[in-house]
Image: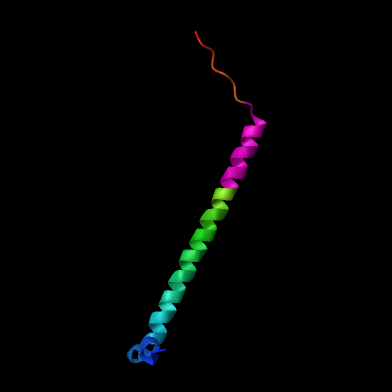
Amino acid sequence: MNPSLFDLSGHGYYLWASYGMMALAIGLELWGLRQRRRRARAQAASLAAEAPVRKAQVQ
């Protein structure tokens, strides 16, 4: 591997650390979205089971 890829004139640590933190933040955001979607679906299913759907009366 090319050592200058990681060195980057002495700024490689900061650059790669910022890329890592951004990847972590995106991963946490995706995980949180997945958890919220699961909770919303479970809540919708429990509400649907509690209250049966009434048919509209046609006049």
Task: Name the outermost residue toward the left.
Answer: 9
- Check the picture and name the quadrant holding the N terminus: bottom left
Residue 14 vs 50, above or below: the answer is below
Q: Position of residue 48 (x, y in %)?
A: 62, 33
Q: Position of residue 28 (x, y in %)?
A: 51, 64
Confirm whether the magenta stretch covers residue 40.
yes
Q: How is the image coloured?
A: rainbow
- The residue depicted at 46 percent of the width and 65 percent of the height is 26
How many numbered marks are there?
0
Confirm whether the magenta stretch covers residue 28.
no
Task: Name the outermost residue toward the top.
Answer: 59
Task: Name the outermost residue toward the right.
Answer: 50
The magenta span reads 39-52
Residue 32 vs 53, above or below: the answer is below
Residue 26 or 47: which is nearer the viewer?
26
Residue 43 or 12: which is nearer the viewer?
12
Residue 43 vs 55, above or below: the answer is below
- The residue depicted at 66 percent of the width and 32 percent of the height is 50
- The residue depicted at 34 percent of the width and 88 percent of the height is 8
- The residue depicted at 51 percent of the width and 55 percent of the height is 33
In the drawing, does residue 18 fall left or right of residue 43? left
Q: Main secondary structure of the magenta part?
A: helix
